[in-house]
Image: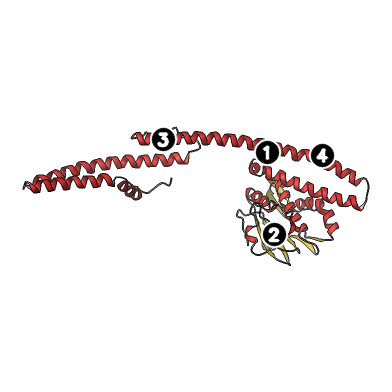
Amino acid sequence: MKEKSFLQLLLCYVKGHKKAIIMYGIFIGIFAVVFSLYSLQLEPVLYAFFLSSIVAFLFIIYDFIKCYKKHNELCIIEKKINIGLDKLPAANNLIEADYQNVLQTLYRQSTELISKTDIKQSEMIDYYTLWAHQIKTPIAAMRLILQSEYSEQNKELLGQAFKIEQYVEMVLGYLKIDSASSDLVLKNYSLLQIIKQVIRKYAHVFVKKNIALDLKEMDCTVLTDEKWLVFVIEQILWNALKYTSSGKISIYMEEASRKVLVIEDTGVGIAEEDLPRVFEKGFTGYNGRADKKATGIGLYLCKKILDKLSHTITITSKVGVGTTVKINLSSVKTIIE
């Protein structure tokens, strides 16, 4: 319910009482006709009309003031609806009381449903978080077994194990994203050191795909959460590696601003019509449909995390040329060009 201005509320009040106003006019007309038919003097009729109009006007002012106060009270209650409906204004009649009873019943049912849903959601998150952590153990064991004996087959299996780890990390990020605000630890970090962490993780993919890395020196300290920013850069770099078959990936700071990190690849690029939707949950676009294994979750998580960190992300791309991702580590608005 939107709080109305005085004039808007007055118009609503008149519309709500138009039946009573019409009825009052009809009664006055009946009296005038009867007095006219009996050839009675018009002066008493006008005098009675004048007195009744004054009384009616005073009553309308009183009733309108009550209506205005009740409207303001209800607007305040609406803003605090999550607290409860215990402070609803007193009902003026049986119908208002019935409406209030319906509202109270719906509110109780809604509160119970939300509570049950929250409990189920919490249990599901706890279970999948535990599952994601537990599955890391057999993955690590599998990696050790595969590393114990070198062969082309084991090398390929190690690559698949790495992909499984990536998906597990994405699951953990997805589960924790809604509670990320309470999980944030904001400190000043060296951006270069954060980037080097990610590069070390993906070094074998660069080697396997024979993709060059052009990492520029940067002297940039950012106020951020290291764990979440690492997650974001990992997702962006993984996308760059996944959709780049040859060429290079460049990582540098934008010349015009010391706080804008640029990750640029020479991959397949993103179709122009897909660009406005790349941050939507589950959207895979043309490349994702061609890949068949894309989830459409990575960039969605990046955007949500960066929003919580008060950073921004901008993506520009051209099919067959490559994609450029810019992360503004100082501003507070997400942009898509």
Amino acid type at mark 3: Gln
Question: How far is mark 2 from mark 1, CA to CA?
Answer: 31 Å
SS at mark 3 in the image? helix
Which residue type does callout 2 highlight?
Answer: Val
Give the residue at mark 3.
100
Q: Are marks 3 and 4 in contact (CB under 8 Å)?
A: no
Mark 4–mark 2 Cα distance, whole angstroms, equals: 33 Å
Whether residue 15 is visible: yes
- Residue 297, how many percent across, how many down? 68, 51
- Figure quadrant of the N terminus: top left
In the picture, residue 129 is in which quadrant?
top right
Please name the amino acid that badge 1 sits on.
Answer: Ile
**Up-down relation of residue 3 to residue 108 (above or below):** below
The residue tagged 2 is: 325
Left or right side of 156 for 135: left
Q: Which one is earlier in the sequence, the residue at label 2 or at label 1? A: 1
In contact (CB < 8 Å): disc 3 and disc 1: no
Mark 3 and mark 1: Cα distance apart in space: 37 Å
For image coordinates 12% across by 48% down, the residue present is: 33
State the residue position of label 4: 137
Q: Which residue is mark 1?
A: 125
Which marked residue is nearer to the observer: mark 4 or mark 2?
A: 4
| Labels 3 and 4: the sequence-earlier one | 3
